[in-house]
């Protein structure tokens, strides 16, 4: 796959109103991703630095599935799977069947690995996979427990920062959300769309909000599902040393704790035939969980430490089916002293590189460069204790999720810090789930309020993103909105198709939107 460019006229600008230098639009040369694949792949060349378009270029790996009813095709839907660090070339094919049928019929669906990620020009701070594995093994899984582990954890991320600065410091300064929003606008133009149709989940919502405010006149339709509060992401547009981390500002600790409580309540409300960890009542099941965590602190089961298990619990709450049932089985195994088997990964899609390198430094480069976090590693233990007081075990996990930012060597050269209320050509549809272990429903409310023209659609359900926790009701509204712009009535609430701990309807493969800093926004 090759990529040539054609020059276009002046691009009017974005943040400060001054025109940016003329930037070539990529020419995408599509071919089947692999022989016989229903997905097509291409490579786009874009400038590393949009303020210096004649300088270094980088590559973006792009994937497309054509509209299945080409005679009724409306256009192209761009999709970002979250992260930061989620590779769209892997996760869009894995989640393709999750899009409403009428959307698949009438839109080409395109995704890409954002700059710095996966099969695009990627941040990679290690000389070999073995070196990366050794680094990962040098720190505790999940988060550190005790002074010795904290010192090793902090040292590991200092070491990562040093390695990254040595490898490609220029790239680290140009993997921001703003850079990726500019890439998205190039891709929109490359496929001949006058306006953008977009769906972003999780981190993809802050990308969507950034695009909507940089290019407000180009928004045709935009669904933002499981939202990041823009003010929390930017620390209220302040670079002052923040008191809290990105995720504590967002409230990820509180929402993870509330979702875990729902998991234990619903588990305890059913039999062990439906939830293996049930102790016969919600209260007894919550007690059982607390006892298990105390046991694991003193006596890990194989490689299953207390902190590693907490990380697994939080991440396993993302996908209700089969995630919650599988998690209950693992917890019961650990309760009985058996080494639990981790959840199987979804099958790799038919793309040229179905398992790209997705080291933690990729998501870190975006998050740490974009979003302010405390720069003193020594404050994280105090933050952890405060978060644990309000959110239990999940508070410890979410506090340490971004400790690597305390010593990260780069700040993004181009960051959009607001305002977030530029009037868009068409309204935005914001979707929020009430029990989401990562992005709180309050963040969806904040997003809907901060954007100039947005409608909030509530998913009164569980898990991270309505896209991968199916609701026919949500799909009906998002499908209608994408096709003809019709918004759901104000105050509309939907429910999931299948409650937790009941037999799910069969559906295609899923992925959690992992990648960098796994278990972060996703």
Image (tube, rainbow, N blue to C red):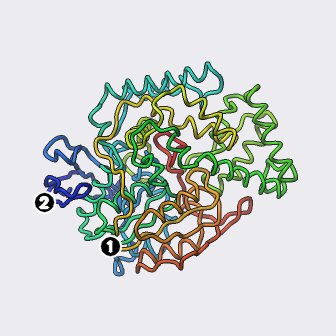
331 is higher (above) or lower (below) than 476: above
- The location of residue 140, given as percent across then percent down, is 59, 27
- The location of residue 12, given as percent across then percent down, is 18, 61
| Total numbered labels | 2
- The location of residue 55, given as percent across then percent down, is 15, 42
Mark 2 surroundings within 10 Å by alpha-carbon count, few (fewer than 14), some (14 through 19), many (20 or more) = few
- The location of residue 287, given as percent across then percent down, is 83, 43
Which residue bears the numbered disc 1?
Answer: 425
Instruction: Judge from the rendering whether residue 55 lies leftward or rightward of residue 304; answer left or right.
Output: left
Work out whether mark 2 precedes mark 1 in sequence or the reverse, and give the earlier one: 2
Instruction: Judge from the rendering whether residue 81 lies leftward or rightward of residue 434; answer left or right.
Output: left
Q: Secondary structure at mark 1?
A: loop
Which residue occupies 74% across, 42% down? 331
Comparing 515 with 343, the one in front is: 515
Does residue 37 appear anywhere in the picture?
no
Indicate the quadrant where residue 238 lies: top left
Which residue occupies 37% across, 33% down? 124
Comparing 189 with 96, the one in front is: 189
Q: Spatial distance from mark 2 to mark 1, Cα to Cα?
A: 21 Å
Which residue occupies 52% across, 41% down? 518
Which residue bears the numbered disc 2?
Answer: 10
Comparing 146 with 341, the one in front is: 146
Q: Are marks 2 and 1 in contact (CB under 8 Å)?
A: no
491 is higher (above) or lower (below) than 115: below
134 is higher (above) or lower (below) than 364: above
129 is higher (above) or lower (below) than 502: above
Indicate the quadrant where residue 454 lies: bottom left
Instruction: Judge from the rendering whether residue 460 lies leftward or rightward of residue 481; answer left or right.
Output: right
Which residue occupies 68% across, 43% down? 390
Q: Secondary structure at mark 2?
A: loop
Does residue 218 appear anywhere in the picture?
yes
Question: Residue 130 has which mark?
Answer: none
């Amino acid at each position: 796959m090759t990529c040539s460019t054609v020059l276009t006229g002046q691009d009017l600008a974005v943040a400060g109103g001054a025109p940016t230098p003329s930037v070539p639009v990529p020419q995408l040369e599509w071919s089947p991703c692999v022989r016989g694949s229903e997905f097509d792949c291409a490579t786009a060349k874009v400038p590393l630095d949009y303020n210096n378009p004649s300088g270094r270029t980088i590559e973006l790996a792009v994937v497309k599935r054509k509209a299945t009813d080409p005679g009724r095709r409306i256009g192209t839907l761009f999709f970002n799977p979250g992260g930061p660090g989620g590779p769209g070339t892997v996760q869009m094919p894995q989640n393709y069947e999750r899009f409403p049928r009428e959307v698949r019929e009438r839109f080409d669906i395109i995704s890409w690995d954002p700059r710095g990620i996966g099969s695009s020009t990627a941040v990679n701070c290690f000389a070999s996979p073995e070196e990366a594995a050794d680094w990962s093994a040098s720190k505790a899984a999940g988060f550190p427990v005790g002074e010795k582990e904290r010192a090793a954890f902090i040292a590991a991320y200092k070491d990562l920062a040093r390695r990254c600065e040595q490898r490609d410091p220029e790239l680290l300064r140009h993997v921001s959300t703003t850079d990726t929003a500019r890439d998205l606008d190039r891709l929109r133009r490359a496929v001949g769309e006058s306006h953008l149709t977009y769906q972003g989940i999780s981190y993809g919502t802050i990308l969507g909000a950034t695009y909507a405010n940089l290019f407000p006149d180009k928004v045709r339709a935009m669904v933002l599902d499981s939202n990041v509060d823009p003010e929390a992401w930017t620390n209220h547009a302040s670079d002052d040393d923040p008191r809290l981390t990105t995720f504590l500002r967002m409230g990820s600790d509180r929402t993870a704790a509330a979702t875990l409580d729902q998991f234990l309540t619903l588990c305890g409300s059913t039999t062990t035939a439906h939830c293996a960890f049930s102790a016969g009542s919600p209260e007894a099941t919550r007690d059982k969980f607390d006892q298990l965590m105390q046991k694991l602190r003193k006596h890990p089961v194989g490689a299953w430490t207390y902190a590693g298990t907490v990380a697994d619990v939080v991440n396993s709450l993302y996908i209700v089916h089969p995630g919650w049932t599988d998690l209950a089985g693992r917890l019961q195994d650990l309760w009985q002293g058996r080494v639990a088997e981790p959840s199987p990964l979804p099958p790799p899609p038919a793309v040229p590189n179905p398992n790209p390198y997705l080291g933690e430094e990729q998501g870190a480069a975006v998050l740490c460069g974009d979003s302010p976090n405390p720069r003193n590693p020594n404050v994280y233990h105090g933050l952890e204790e405060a978060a644990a007081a309000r959110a239990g075990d999940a508070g410890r996990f979410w506090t340490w999720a971004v400790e690597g930012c305390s010593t990260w060597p780069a700040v993004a050269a181009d960051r959009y810090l607001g305002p977030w209320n530029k009037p868009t050509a068409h309204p935005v549809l914001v979707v929020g789930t009430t029990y989401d272990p990562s992005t709180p429903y309050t963040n969806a409310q904040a997003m809907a309020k901060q954007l100039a023209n947005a409608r909030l659609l509530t998913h009164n359900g569980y898990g991270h993103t309505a896209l991968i926790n199916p609701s026919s009701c949500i799909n009906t509204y998002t499908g209608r909105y994408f096709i003809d712009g019709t918004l759901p009535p104000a105050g509309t609430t939907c429910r999931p198709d299948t409650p937790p701990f009941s037999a799910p309807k069969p559906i295609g493969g899923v992925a959690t939107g992992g990648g960098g800093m796994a278990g972060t926004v996703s």
